[in-house]
């Protein structure tokens, strides 16, 4: 077993980047030298940061890691958010609670259901691009496409009025706030209150939507309307926040690489590969996905002790040279099959992956065909990531185009 560095010498999160599209050089060094490294979290507590592809994949699937902790008040904390910055759930019942949640959600986002939604998503992308074409450039594409589309899709699916997005969009974003104490919790309380009213209305008058479906099966799974409202908050937020970030960075990769963008315009058959390459290359925030060891785990020459915090970093693992040739190159024709971990792996594999892929496929199959002259309206160096948020998505994406 290797001895971890003394706690006084641990590297501290967050790690800085030189460029908005690049991975932090500090993380790259850790990945090369210590793919499972002891670090300090955003609040200064010790945790294991896992950046090596094989280790991240193995630990995603290891049931000795969970989200709960036997003594939550003494557990290492990841961020200042009371909601997402430490252990969650009941330590005694975590596995059964999680399994129930997965079973409850399975029909809502199944591959079959998403396939049936594809015509709707394609039409929505067309309408969104028509609307974009009617605006006078420069335009913030983050607001007008990357945000607008996934929110409209998830609102439609869940039966939440898109016209009320201004009520909840800041709450959804603030759920991921990792720097202001209490921000995420305040946002959750407001969002939950809003969703509780929607749930109540759907109890009286069910519609053709996921919230009504969840309410219909709630008795079978022995869950309350309050539980459905809580899940609905997370679904509405998870159902667009990450997709917004991936659309933004994906478009930016193509805006800064004319040859690959041209290749995609000329050969629509490349679109599925483009989507997978974007999912692989985008690195989101540096906090990693939190877990707590439920028992001692020996892996990669280190001993993770029961109760230790572990941060799994799939978007860093997706740039591991041991798993991908030339990992920092954006290559729309990457082969063989792109086995990235963007949606996680194992029991918590993202249930929204089919939906996210369908939205990305529609956007990357249409955007550059419709706007062949699309380009950044500001120098690349002026673009920023939102460092207060765990996603670290783009704050804005100003673009312009020639007359179409
Ligand atoms: C590009 C878009 C997306 C990416 C990259 C993404 C990524 C992820 C990842 C990595 C996880 C695993 C978290 C962990 O292991 O701790 C996850 C979980 C989850 N995602 Fe997504 N996601 C995306 C879109 C969506 C959408 C559209 C939805 C819903 C409609 C969604 C709903 C969820 C839910 C409910 C979980 C929790 C699953 C569980 O704990 O078992 N995601 N997502």
Image (spheres, rainbow, N blue to C red):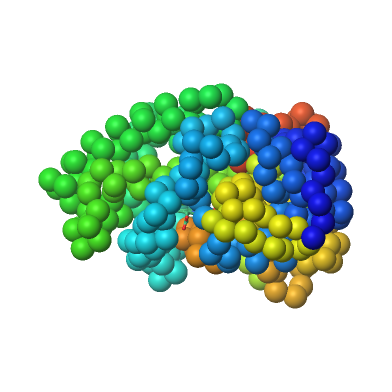
Instruction: Report the front residue among 148 and 76.
Output: 76
Q: Is residue 23 left or right of residue 174?
A: right
Q: Residue at x 25, y 61 (%)?
A: 221
Instruction: Report the front residue among 246 and 271.
Output: 246
- What is the x, y in percent for residue 279? 65, 57
Which quadrant of the structure image shows residue 319?
bottom right
Residue located farthest toward the left when viewing the structure as drawn: 204
Q: Is residue 298 left or right of residue 145?
A: right
Instruction: Report the front residue among 335 and 140.
Output: 335
Quarter of the image with the C terminus is top right
Rendered view: 335 above or below 178? below
Q: Is residue 343 visible?
A: no
- What is the x, y in percent for residue 74? 53, 37
Give the tally of numbered discs: 0
Q: Residue at x 61, y 47 (%)?
A: 309
Q: Is residue 187 visible?
A: yes
Q: Residue at x 22, y 46 (%)?
A: 225
- What is the x, y in percent for residue 9? 83, 36
Q: Is residue 236 left or right of residue 397?
A: left
Quarter of the image with the N terminus is bottom right
Which quadrant of the structure image shows residue 287?
top right
- What is the x, y in percent for residue 282? 70, 50
Q: Residue at x 47, y 47 (%)?
A: 70
């Amino acid at each position: 077993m290797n001895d971890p560095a003394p706690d006084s010498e641990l590297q501290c999160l967050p790690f800085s980047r030189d460029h908005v599209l690049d991975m932090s050089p500090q993380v790259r060094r850790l990945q090369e030298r210590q793919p499972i490294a002891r670090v300090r979290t955003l609040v200064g507590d010790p945790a294991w940061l896992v950046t090596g592809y094989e280790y991240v994949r193995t630990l995603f699937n290891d049931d000795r890691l969970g989200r709960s902790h036997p003594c939550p008040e003494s557990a290492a904390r990841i961020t200042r958010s009371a909601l997402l910055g430490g252990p969650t759930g009941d330590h005694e019942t975590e596995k059964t609670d999680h399994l129930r949640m997965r079973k409850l959600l399975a029909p809502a986002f199944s591959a079959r259901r998403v396939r049936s939604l594809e015509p709707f998503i394609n039409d929505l992308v067309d309408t969104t691009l028509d609307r974009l074409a009617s605006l006078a450039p420069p335009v913030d594409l983050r607001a007008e496409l990357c945000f607008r589309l996934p929110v409209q899709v998830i609102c439609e699916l869940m039966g939440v009025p898109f016209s009320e997005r201004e009520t909840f969009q800041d709450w959804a974003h603030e759920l991921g706030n990792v720097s202001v104490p209490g921000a995420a919790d305040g946002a959750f309380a407001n969002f939950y209150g809003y969703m509780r009213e929607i749930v109540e209305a759907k109890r009286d008058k069910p519609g053709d939507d996921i919230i009504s479906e969840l309410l219909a099966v709630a008795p079978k799974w022995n869950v309350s309307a309050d539980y459905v409202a809580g899940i609905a908050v997370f679904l509405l937020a998870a159902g667009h926040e990450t997709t917004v970030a991936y659309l933004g960075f994906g478009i930016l990769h193509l805006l800064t690489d004319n040859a690959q963008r041209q290749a995609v315009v000329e050969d629509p058959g490349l679109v599925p590969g483009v989507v997978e390459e974007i999912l692989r290359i985008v690195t989101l925030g540096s906090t990693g996905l939190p877990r707590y060891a439920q028992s001692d785990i020996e892996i990669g020459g280190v001993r993770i002790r029961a109760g230790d915090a572990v941060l799994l970093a799939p978007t860093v693992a997706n740039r591991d040279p041991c798993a991908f040739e030339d990992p920092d190159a954006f290559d729309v024709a990457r082969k063989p099959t792109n086995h990235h971990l963007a949606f996680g792996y194992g029991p918590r594999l993202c249930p929204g992956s089919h939906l996210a892929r369908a939205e990305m496929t529609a956007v990357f199959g249409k955007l550059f065909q419709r706007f062949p002259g699309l380009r950044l309206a500001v120098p690349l160096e002026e673009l920023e990531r939102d460092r207060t948020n765990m996603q670290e998505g783009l704050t804005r994406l100003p673009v312009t185009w020639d007359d179409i």
